Amino acid sequence: MSRTTPHSRASRLATAGIAATTATLLAVALSPAAHADPRPTRAGAVENAASALVAHAAALGLTSAQDTEVRDVIVDNDGTQHVRYDRTYRQLPLLGGDFVVHLASDGDYRGADRATRKAISLATVTPSVSAPRAADLASNALRAAHPGTTLKKVTAKPQLVVDALHGTPQLAWRTNAVALDSLGNPVARTVLTNARTGAQIDAWDTIETVTGDGQSLYSGTVALESTASGSTFQLTDPTRGNTYTGDAANQTDLCIFGICIIRAPSTVFTDTDNHWGTGATSDRASAAVDAQYGTNETWDYYKNVHGRNGIGNDGKGSYNRVHYGNSYNNAFWDDSCFCMTYGDGDGTTFGPLVALDVAGHEMTHGVTSKTAALTYSGESGGLNEATSDILGTMVEWYANNSADQGDYLIGEKIVRPGFGKATLRFMDKPSRDGNSADSWSSSVGNLDVHYSSGVANHFAYLLAEGSGAKTINGVSYDSPTSNGSTVTGIGRDKVGTIWYRALTVYMTSSTKYAGARTATLNAARDLYGASSAEYGAVAAAWSAVNVN
């Protein structure tokens, strides 16, 4: 997936200008109005972090060959600042180069969390493997990932990068390969290739899967904001960044060299009486009601619970496309269009994939991409998927909809009868789906990310509800522990708060399960104190899934 991430400013590490920068910062510090507001602004946090980068360059592993760019800024209520950076090496993107600088309320440097502590030094950034060869290798890898399927319009676009995520830092091609399957639906894979030898380093799917009022398919009759346009209404919500839902007319995107040059149409839905849908699939607006409602609840959850103003924390709304492709058994978030896309399902395995927890899950991928940007492979990929399951589940509980009550099941509404199981994933005991891991082992990182996510999903359930058998909202759960312990839950609201802070403040692109334990403990310490019951419960829940 091509990601376009807006940055507030670029911060370059260079010896020239350090004295001027220091003088400027000193002048600001001595200004009578410098500390008038006890809580620093975003711009102030960035300036403080820029000063810290100069003062602590060696400790942060920064050299004159590297540049840094701000990705995200969080300022706590007490003025503590957290500034997240991406890095380049000799003007090439540095995978695993991201880090978070932590500053006290007065701007003093407290430390940093880094995706890698490896020294970055390459003899050359000239590749031996050509870009066309890298494109061919990635295209072949995409075909190999879809055996028995004839892919059409296969294209690939390589980008030269420095990879610090997989062993010794190395020059690599990161290639986004895209194609259409036999039904005309999109498939995509990112392939990381050693630029000196042509060996594949890693590969992962880059369409992240789950797989007025309106009458929805799954959530009953719901309230919807719309926009009047002459004698009609548009399904556009001006109260949530002008988020809208459009009809893709069962078409798909046209992508060349990894860039979608023609997107499936997203003609905004209109209505004459501001009453949308009938609750039946025969009315194309019914799925649009679910999609818009899911966007609304996800927006409100992040804003009202976590203070986040939209997926990108910039007040801008995303948009939805429903009725995408032909019998498309998928829903996905795409950073490049900042949009959510839903297929109608094949009617046998899945119905339309517009359920509330699916919306929360997929749009949380957007939040992750704007914050920790967890790499979508290995243990980091499992944590990426688990983040969407955990916070998507919190969206469902937050909505408090009697037609789709909160639960710890993923995608239960979209699964058709006769599929063989009632839901896609079970958080209380992930192995109930036949594939997911209940607890950590050294082989977890080799699983598909939708299955390695089970470790964190199980942790989150145990932390929220505790171990053992219980019935919640009419659903029976029985959650075991790998160490035979009894875990007492602290409630789902605290779990969501702890996980969100860990994601946005402490996790990085390379975080694995051990790092997730540290990140969530740090978050619990910040929120409740190191001696709190919540802190102890986080530790106990991780130990119960063998993350110690």
Image (tube, rainbow, N blue to C red):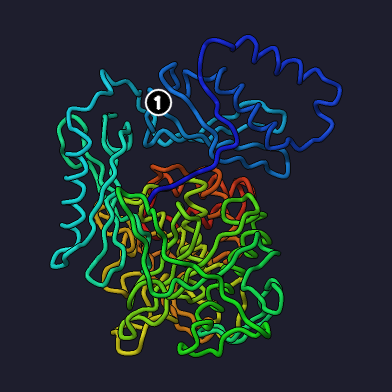
Residue at x 37% of width, y 29% of height: 92
Residue at x 17% of width, y 45% of height: 136
- Front-lying residue, 144 or 459: 144
Location of mark 1 (residue) = 91
- Front-lying residue, 41 or 214: 214
The image quarter in which residue 353 lies? bottom left
Q: Is residue 423 left or right of residue 299?
A: left
Residue at x 36% of width, y 79% of height: 345
Crowd band around label 1 with a 10 angstrom C-alpha radius: few (<14), some (14–19), many (20+): few
Regarding mark 1 in the picture, which secondary structure is present there? loop
Rendered location of residue 1, percent (x, y) = 37, 51
The relative height of residue 487 versus residue 73 in the rendered view (above or below) is below
The image quarter in which residue 404 lies? bottom right
The relative height of residue 200 versus residue 205 in the rendered view (above or below) is above
Q: How many marks?
A: 1
- Front-lying residue, 529 or 517: 517
Residue 67 visible (yes or no): yes
Q: Is residue 52 left or right of residue 480?
A: right
Rendered location of residue 534, percent (x, y) = 58, 56
The relative height of residue 169 versus residue 448 in the rendered view (above or below) is above
Residue at x 55% of width, y 23% of height: 53
- Front-lying residue, 328 or 28: 328
The image quarter in which residue 294 lies? bottom right
Rendered location of residue 521, percent (x, y) = 52, 48
Rendered location of residue 483, percent (x, y) = 36, 61
Residue 428 visible (yes or no): no
Type of the residue with mark 1? Gln
